Structure formats: C-alpha cells, structure tokens
C-alpha cells in the first residue's frame, strides 16, 4: 500500500538539521513548520539534542515509539547503514532523499539494489533515492525540500523535481492547488505506476498530472492509464519530445522522434490527455479542476469583440473543432436579448456596448436545456467606456451558470483579463476558470470534448 | 502626410459631450484629461457652452482659430453636413469615429464615397468612418474611445478596435507600451498601408504591430512590408486564418484556407514576422522591444533545472532551431565556474544549487566575444531552499549582460517567474524581458534569428 507514505502516524527525519545551508534543513522545516500535520515527528541528529523545538535522537533505534515513515537525508555513504537501522526499527516506509546512487555510477546502482532487496525481505516499501520527496497537502505534510502548493484536487507525479516546483508556481498563479505530489527519483522500489495507481484510488484526487522524461515499461504505463481513464482525467506532459530534448534529458534511445509519436498515440488510446507544452498543460489542469464534462460537441460563442470571436474560431478550427450554426429555436430566443444590429450567427457578436445584462441573458439562453448548445464560450475584451467594468460581464456569465446548475461547461474567454485583479478575485471567489487567450479557451474546449469521448467509449 | 493626424496643433471635437452614457464622451474626456497634450482643444456642442471646463462652440465655423484636426462623433445622419462645415473651415485632417456607413449598407457606402470625393477635392485627408480613432502616446493624445496604453516604442495599426484594446492590456501586463495606435475603420480615404508608411518613417516607432482580418490589395501590402523590413520589424497577426475564423470575420472570399497560406508566405518573403496566435504576438513584440539582433545562430543554454533545459530544447527543435555543442574553448572556460558534477553539454545543467554567482559567471562566459555563442538563454526555476531568491539569479544574468555591453541577446527563461512581483520589478527596472515558458523563450529565439536573416538578406 502506497497510502501509508502519504498518511503516516509517525515520521522520523534522519539527518534533520537547523543549518539553513543544507538541503536536509528544507525537508526538516517543511515537515515541522505545518501545525496542521498531526503525525508525531522524531528528528534524528548526530549533533543536536533538539531540532526546531523538538527532541532529537542520535539514532532511529533510540526513538521510544514505533515509526511509520523514515525520511533519510544523510550523505550517501551513510545511507546503507541508516537503512539497516530502519529495518531493525521495523519502520513501515522509507523515503531516501539523498542523491549519489544509481544515477551517478554502476557501483551506486549496486548499492541501491542491495538496499532494495533487504527492504523487500523486511516488507518495507521505499521511495527514492535521489528524489525531492512527497507531499500530502490535505494533511499538511510536506516531506520534500520544495515549496508548498495551494491546497487543491490535483495530484502530480513528476520525474523532474525542479519541474514540479515550476508547475506548483504555474498552478498558484492560476489559483489552483494540489492534493498530493510525488517525485520518486531513481525508483529503486516504489514505481511511477504505483504512485499513479494510488492517485487513482485516492478520493481527494480529482485530476492526475504527470510529467515524465522516460518511460521504462510502456505496456505497464499504458495499462495504468487505461485503468485510470474511466475515473479521472490523467494529464501528461513529456520532456524530451524531440532529438534535442531527449539529448538534454540525457537519454540515448535509438529512434527518438518516433518514440514520442508512439507514446502520444498510446496515451490517447489509453484515454489520457497528452499536452505538447506547459501552457496547454496548465490550461488542461485548470479545465478539469473546475468544469463539468459536456454532453455533446456543439459550441456556442458570444462576444463583445468581433476580433475575439474570430480568433477563438481560428484556434478552435486549428484544434479540430467545429462551430455549428445556431438552431432556429435558439435564434428566436436570442433575438430579443441583444440590440437589432446583432446578426444571429455563431459567434454571436453583441458589439462593444454589450453589458452585464446582455452577457447574463445570452449566456443563460445558451446554457438552458433546449438551446442545442453543449459548451458555452462567452468572450470579452475590456471596453473602457459607458462606465463598463470588466468583472461585471464575468459576473453576468456566472449568474447564468449558477442559475442553470453549472451543468454545461462555461469557458469564459476574457482576453488578457487575468491581468485585472478584480476579475481574478471574482473568478477565485466563484470557483470559475478564466481563459486569457483564444487558444487557451479553444484548448479547454478541445480537452473537454476529448474527455467526453473517453467516457462515452468506456461506458 | 499622415503625420499631422498624429501631431496636430489644434483639435476640434465635434459632438463633444459630458454624458458618460455616450461613446463621444469617452473620446472627449480621453483628449481633454491629459495635461501632457499641448494642442489647443475646441469642443463643439449643440447643447452646452462649456465641456469639461473648456469653452464649447455650436459649430466648427464658430471656432476663432484655425483647426488642424477635426474629430467627428455626431450621429451618422449629421456627419455629411458636419464634413461640409469642416471643408468650409479649411481644417487639415478629419477623423470620423461615427459608424453606420459603408459597413451597413450600399447607401452608406455611397455617402462615404461622396464625402471622400469632396474632401479629396479640398485637400483634406480623412481617417474612418466607423473607427475607434488614433493615439499618439508620445504627446499625450488619445483621440480614440479606448484606454491609454503605457508609453513605449511599439506602434500598432489594427483592423479591429476591440482587439486593439486587448493588445494594450496584453502589453501592459508585460510592462510594455505603445508610441502610436490607429484603427481606421472603413478606410474611406487614409489606408492601412499609409499608416504603415508613416510608422516606418516615425523615429519614435521601433517596432510595428499589425492586426488584420482582410487584405484588400495584397501586392501593395507586400510592397509596404518590404519597404519597412530593412528599418523595423513588422509583426503581423491575422484574424481569420481558418474557414471558421473567416466566416466569423464576415468575409466571404472563395478559397479561404489557401488565402492564409499565401498571405503568410508573402509576409515572410517581404521580411515581416507572421505570428499564429496572440501569445506568440506578444512574445515577439516584447522580444523586438528589448533585445538586440544576434550575429549568428548559435544558442547557449544554462539552467538550474534539467526539466527547463529539456523543455526549452524540445520547443527550440519544434520551431526549427538547433542547439550546437559547446566549443572546447568554451568548455574550458565554463568548467571552473560550476560544481564538478556539471556535465559540459548544451544545455548546461548547473543543478538546483546554482546561485547568483554561478548565473553571473556562466552567463558572462557565454556572452563574451570568444564564446562561439550568439544567443544566451539562462533558464531557472524557483528552488526554495538554501535561502535562494528567484530575482537574485536574474540579477546575476543582468550583471553579466550589462558588463558585456548588451551586445548579444539575453533570453531569461524563468519558468512561471512573472508571477513573482520581485522578479517583475527587477525586469522592469532593468529593461530586461523575462519569458515564463520554454515555448515563449524558444519563440523569442526563433524571431530574433528570423529578423537577423532578413537584415542579412537586405544588406
């Protein structure tokens, strides 16, 4: 069970230190600082009798209680004997953060394998070595040396620790957070796929984010993704899509470019969502975090800016989507809601004077059951006249969405709107995503339809 | 001369109003509010004797002095007689903001043509009708109903007024501004190409931004771009790249998709830069605003995050760029500047512990004349340990750039770094661009090389 890694009742930090110049200090203080974490914490230190206000022990063997999880931060040469101590102490789980094993030499690999065998025989599961660690934001456990994300419903497993940092920032600027995070380094025991299996069964994980640079066992990865598909969206980004990227990732497989093509096809086939860059990756995570899956492919667009409607249409078609004409029924419903000049075509250009009331009524007409529309995309730019406020139009859209039970996905395209603090405030308060560019909004539309098709297929 | 539109000594605002519910009020207050504008302002109003503290006149014929520029805001049915008054008054330039002419009916088109003929005979040039207006930020003149951008060196002509608003926001969030802006609506007299010709000769315009939805005369547009190419980068975005986009733009040409392919080839051939979406458009404007053109195609990458280097390499290759190996000479220079573990390959992964000093020294080594590197891309993610600060690494890069005279382009890729206020502060203060994603940084690299090739060709 991977579960106990993420919800231990007691944690020993071996190599705990107050020295801010050491990596181990980041892990120690990340664990100790969070008052939400109820697990018992036992710092282990050769040199200090207290660490950050807690009693420290010279060895894990000196800890007077049982230990669920031991986190090892000591230099590589001391790790094997510390692991022996952990076995003797009968800890249940170990995370080895320390680097300098299989990733640097064949000898390191051998040491790794020996430790793995001993732990397997003792029934202890191990994450690492050479990893950033793991986090369970739900219980306030940051067992890693990187920052805390906001709390949320996304769980991420990343083959790059530093990329995990970057994604945490990217999510934070978009007001999104994480439930769980894992970077497992050399994976001498617990595998990438096992983490995914755990996220699949974890009730607090609604969306799974994956960053990988190499796939060891393609068939197994495919099977895990296929198992996840009916339950949760699994969003994948791969570093090393090209020859240059693979070279930078230090990988030396034969046919590199084709590898990515094959992997991409496999992820699609398994029902995952493969993104091509971090912009689309963040957009996709945001989309699945906040929007329901549509019941069909019909997209309805309304706008106060012809240009925004045009550019959304371009991006949509470039992503393989199609805007259908409005039904006669919908046209009749829309006509009285806008000024006479407005032509009853999709996108519906309500012209620059459109106000909150127009946005509310037209969005609602499209969200209603009988509209023939499955996905509503209200677009807007900031027209700074007639006393208009950007956030007001957003509030109109949200009112319509709330009154129709948030059943259909609402994709507000507010061009560069995320730069307006008040707009961000409304979006955060109301748990509504905003998309800042036509491409982002079209990409959100695309992945929602893709997910709908996966669910239809698996039904 | 288009110049006088942008630098009038006296302006009459015909249809000036204090009523905030009217479009005309936005134009009036935009002109009156800016203390920087030294031109004399004459509001013309049928109903008020003063407007926003200025003496108002019932007719332009009552203005006691000569008028360089008349801006017409009155309802469409009054416009022809107001134009007659302007001719009698011998104004030099007219902007007709009012809509409701050629864009709505053949009759409107006829009225437009008659007005155009009269003005031509009187030697008066006209912008509009059905337009947002123009701006000259350098002299504090906002003769439009949209917002003020920040001051800057980019001049934009846009076939969509609302898209102009959106781009002003997009530039503002990136700490960039404009010199001049024009939206010319139905273009009954002054053409899109004439505005471009003016921007080409305007000394305050360093970068030209173009948004268009339809090209009336492809050959003429090609010739203007070709004329601009040796002097300034002309950055183009087209709305209506696809069937869906063209339909939304209300255009009904025969072979739509192929049109864009042809236009794109023509822009490339003429030496302009065609972007495919607003993200790339903003990135390109930022790049040309702040970075010098490289002398060659060799890219040098350094990073504290393997993942960032990998993803930059992927994006670079996807955009047709190539990372070459470092020369032996450069490897020798770099070796003592980083820890032993670092491998002398491009991208140079300095590992998470890299600090300001590492960034400074390695960036400088690559920027120096003898490095064999033409474009330097320092990448970073925020590693929140060992007391590191994100902005410090940026300061290290900038120090190196300053000490080498800012001769080679520096492309700082700080993954999602623009979310950090302190990072933005440093970038703004030091006039350095920051790029938040691997794609953005790679796109910046691509357009710099593209521009170098245009200049080499024209030399």
Image (cartoon, coloured by chain):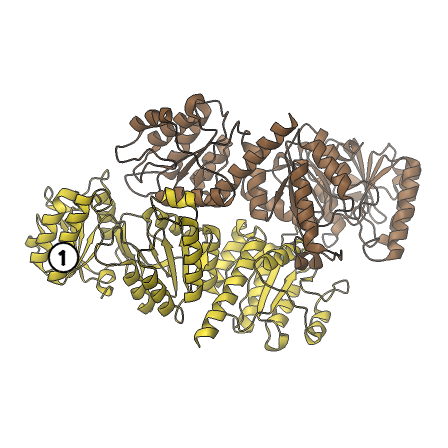
Chain colours: A brown, B yellow
The relative height of residue B44 versus residue A268 in the rendered view (above or below) is below
Q: On the picture, is B67 further left or further right than B102?
A: left
Query: Mark 1 highlights which residue?
Result: B117
Tell which subunit mark 1 falls on.
Answer: B
At 19% across and 48% down in the image, what residue appears? Answer: B109
Position of residue A104 measured from the top left corner of the image (x, y, whole percent): 82, 57
Q: Quadrant of the N terminus of chain A?
A: top right
Q: Is residue A144 at all visible to an observer of this figure?
A: yes
Number of residues whose C-alpha sits closer than 10 Å to that of mark 1, classed few (under 14), some (14–19) or many (20 or more): some
Q: On the picture, is A15 further left or further right than B75?
A: right
Q: Is residue A209 at all visible to an observer of this figure?
A: no
The relative height of residue A58 versus residue B371 in the rendered view (above or below) is above
Q: Quadrant of the C terminus of chain A?
A: top right
Helix, strand or loop at disc 1?
helix
Position of residue A9 measured from the top left corner of the image (x, y, whole percent): 79, 30
Question: Quick one: B386 or B269, which is closer to the camera?
Answer: B269
Disc tally is 1
Position of residue A174 measured from the top left corner of the image (x, y, whole percent): 54, 41
Question: Quick one: B290 or B322, which is closer to the camera?
Answer: B322
At 65% across and 38% down in the image, what residue appears? Answer: A272
Quarter of the image where one finds residue B459:
bottom left
At 12% across and 49% down in the image, what residue appears? Answer: B80
Position of residue A350 measured from the top left corner of the image (x, y, whole percent): 32, 36
């Amino acid at each position: 069970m991977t579960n106990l890694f993420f919800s231990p009742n007691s944690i020993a930090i071996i190599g705990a230190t107050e020295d801010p110049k050491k990596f181990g200090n980041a892990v120690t203080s990340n664990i100790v600082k969070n008052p939400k974490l109820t697990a018992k914490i036992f710092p282990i230190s050769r040199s200090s009798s207290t660490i950050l206000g807690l009693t420290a022990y010279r060895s894990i063997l000196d800890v007077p209680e049982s230990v669920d999880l031991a986190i090892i931060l000591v230099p590589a040469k001391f790790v094997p004997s510390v692991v022996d101590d952990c076995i003797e102490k009968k800890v249940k789980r170990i995370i080895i953060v320390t680097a300098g094993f299989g990733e640097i030499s064949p000898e390191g690999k051998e040491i790794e394998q020996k430790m793995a065998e001993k732990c397997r025989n003792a029934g202890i599961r191990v994450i690492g070595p050479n990893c950033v660690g793991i986090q369970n934001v739900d219980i306030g456990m940051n067992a890693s040396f990187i920052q805390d994300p906001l709390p949320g419903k996304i769980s991420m497993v990343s083959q790059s620790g530093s990329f995990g940092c970057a994604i945490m920032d990217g999510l934070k600027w978009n007001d999104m957070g994480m439930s769980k995070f894992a970077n497992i380094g050399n994976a001498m025991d617990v595998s990438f796929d096992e983490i995914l299996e755990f996220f699949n069964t974890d009730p607090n994980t609604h969306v799974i984010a994956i960053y990988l640079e190499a796939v060891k066992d393609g068939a197994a990865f495919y099977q895990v993704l296929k198992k996840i598909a009916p339950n949760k969206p699994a969003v994948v980004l791969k570093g090393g899509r090209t020859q240059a990227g693979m070279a930078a990732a230090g990988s030396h497989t034969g046919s590199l470019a084709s590898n990515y093509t094959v992997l991409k096809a496999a992820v699609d086939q398994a029902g995952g969502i493969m993104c091509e860059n971090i912009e689309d990756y963040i957009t996709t995570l945001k989309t699945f975090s906040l929007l329901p899956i549509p019941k069909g492919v019909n997209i309805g667009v309304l706008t106060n800016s012809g240009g925004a409607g045009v550019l959304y249409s371009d991006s949509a078609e470039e992503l393989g989507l199609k805007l259908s004409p409005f039904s006669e029924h919908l046209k009749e419903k829309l006509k009285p809601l806008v000024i006479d000049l407005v032509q009853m075509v999709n996108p519906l250009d309500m012209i620059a004077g459109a106000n909150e009331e127009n946005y509310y009524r037209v969005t609602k007409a499209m969200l209603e059951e009988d509209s023939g529309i499955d996905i509503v995309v209200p677009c807007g730019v900031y027209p700074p006249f007639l006393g208009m406020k950007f956030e007001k139009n957003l509030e109109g859209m949200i009112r319509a969405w709330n009154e129709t039970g948030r059943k259909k996905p609402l994709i507000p395209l507010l061009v560069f709107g995320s730069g307006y603090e008040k707009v961000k405030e409304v979006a955060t308060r109301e748990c509504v995503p905003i998309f800042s560019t036509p491409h982002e909004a079209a990409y959100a539309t695309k992945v929602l339809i893709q997910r709908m098709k996966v669910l239809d297929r698996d039904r």
